[in-house]
Amino acid sequence: MKTSSGFLKSAQWCLTALLALVALNSLILWQLHGLPPAQRIFGTLGSCSDPSTSSFSRRASQSATSNSPSATSNSQTPATTPSYINPSAYGPPFNALEELHHALQTMQDYYFAIWVGKYTSSIDWTGAVIGTFLSASLFSLTRSLEYILPPSFTQPSTITLQGEKVENEVNKYFSQSVAYYFGENAMDIRFQAFDDMLWVVLGWLESVRFIKTHSNAHYDVPNSQDGWGGGAWAGGAWHGNQFVPSFAHRANIFYGLASQGWDTKLCGGGMNWNPRLTPYKNAITNQLYISASVAMYLYFPGDRNPSPYITTAGDDDGVRAEPGETKKADISRPHDPMYLSNAVTAYDWLKNSNMTNKKGLYVDGFHITGWHPNGTIGTGKCDERNEMVYTYNQGVVLSGLRGLWEGTGNVDYLADGHKLVRNVIKATGWNSSTSPRNPEWSGLGRNGILEELCDSRGSCSQNGQTFKGIYFHHLTHFCEPLPTKPVIPGITFAAGPTERSLHEQSCKEYASWVVWNARGAMSTRDNEGRYGAWWGAGIWNGTSTPPLRMVDDAEDYRNEGLGDEKKWGRGWNDGLGITPPLVGIPGGGQIPFSDDMFQNAPSATSGQKTSPEDPAFPRVLAGSRDLNGRGRGRTVETQGGGVAVLRAMWEFVHLYAKDTGSMVLKDMGKETSSRWNDMKGKAKNIQESTPQANTPA
């Protein structure tokens, strides 16, 4: 007994000494390096809690107990709550992933009607975009934790528990995505504008991409048929795979229909916007065609379903068969070089179309002087330019450029993308991390916040309320790390160390700007967690903003729904899907739009509640007026924007915060921009990894 007792005392002493050593080491590291990386990145955004209790947990349970005496002694509650947080109303934020989860939950709980499979207040194209944001968020959530299902004997129980929580969330929202597939107004969209069709293509390919990623990451399906042994069971592939053929078929149908918009008789090429109106070759339709084409090349798994129709000239039902292949084996094959060729051709046309202004931003598009429906093509040239600048026109092409690099290995595409991103950031008034607040309108915002011209006026339509989210969605895709090995051997390219490092460093430089915009978006939330449209509202502290004026020859047709019938064609207003800038208020009635940004803003106490306050965005309200309650107010489109920018924040922090100094900007872009310029035109010299075989021409 003495020996045993002595052994226990010795073990206890050793354990105590070890813990003391660990504590001392932690203290030294804390003093040397300061706050943990997440806190350095977010400043006062909040601290991370124990993931076993915070990840994907409901804030309502915390809100219900936050005013009780026991709540103050809860070990999970931070000792000091940031001053801008109202714990009883919304609870303290934990981290970027937690914020994304709650933005997504609010979007689905408030705006998605599962019984009809629709975002009932959206229009067709905005619903397709919101569905894309949902699938992209699942793509982020599934990569947030490593786990294998079913649990294996070697898998730590903590990872198993967290994996099951993540899996439950993923399955919940994926089932809603499936419901949206059946609720989507697919028949009507076939007869709408070409850009409407292409949003559908991108949406369902995003879902296909997520399904593949989720299944490969979390479901171990070896050849073994030994039931639960080894972490898998017979036939244990994730159930979501059964929907891939349906999603792929819808993408295929709409890609085929939209491709009819490509025209070479006018302007030497380019996609027309709307077949029911006079020819208008705009940035968004052409960017969508580029991104959809390259996405079809990279992610489309093929389609054997001939229903209802997708034929081309000839008697082979549109089948493009390889030599020796049965003629009707596949309606459309995966990785068809036609898709890549379409993307390359479309980007070449767009780049040389003179569709960018002096700031390097894409304007909206071109009319053709003298065109008439009687068959007269007039000049036949894109010579009447609409100078209007929208945020989404700077974003959609980014995912296309990323895909073009992966499909061709040409680094010029990446260089063009980074140049555009820098132009956008500069156009928000962002200069550096120490002085990001230029209050003057800079082309796409001010104070470093991305902004539509209609945001501060409260006059955005459903279209305009969707645009900023689209930008951040495609920026996030563009900045994913480049693969070091071909993702699809023989089809895609991989990055060598030089390309990968430069791309990563460039994207690191954008991270603090992304977080700044996410903080602005978070400051617009009401007590229900619903995001507003004007992310920079809080910076003005209730004072009048500098007057904004559209540039000459700019027409804000996406928000105002105005236009000369002679210029746009008959049925113009009917073809836009624009609703007036009005929003219902409790008790009935509507709030009219006013040029005075504070006039007619709803009271913060009569339906629209106050937002948690961030010191960087001190007031969202002008006195007692809610600036994000004007016009259409908070909608599914503004919530989607919140989801997209919160996802961007999570991905940038998650991917690029390993080097803690990378989040601090000095002179953004000078060094890396110069390096991109040096690399342009030298793709053949620096290409360090190529497809293994069957390299596309």
Image (cartoon, helix red, strand yellow):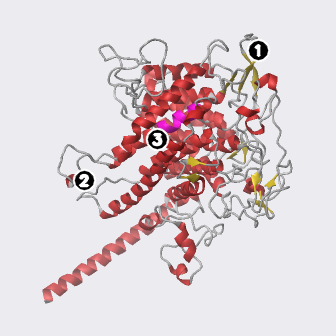
Which quadrant of the rendered structure holds the N terminus? bottom left
Residues drawn in magenta = 197-206
- Quadrant in which residue 451 is drawn: top right
Q: Name the residue rendered at 54%, 60% in the picture.
A: 39
Which residue is label 1 attached to? 372
First of labels 3, 2 by sequence position: 3
Q: Determine the main secondary structure of the stretch shown in magenta.
A: helix
- Quadrant in which residue 228 is drawn: bottom left
State the residue in front, 142 or 690: 142
User: Compared to 57, does 499 lie above or below?
Assistant: above
Tell me if label 2 and label 1 are in contact, CB under 8 Å.
Answer: no
Indicate the position of residue 215 as horizontal and vertical percent values. Answer: 35, 45
Q: Is residue 7 left or right of residue 695?
A: left
Residue 379 seen by the camera: yes
Name the secondary structure under disc 3.
helix
Which residue is label 3 attached to? 207
Q: Is residue 610 left or right of residue 161?
A: right
Could you give the CA–CA distance between mark 2 and mark 1, rounded to whole angstroms?
Answer: 67 Å
Q: Is residue 173 left or right of residue 285?
A: left
State the residue in front, 526 or 606: 606
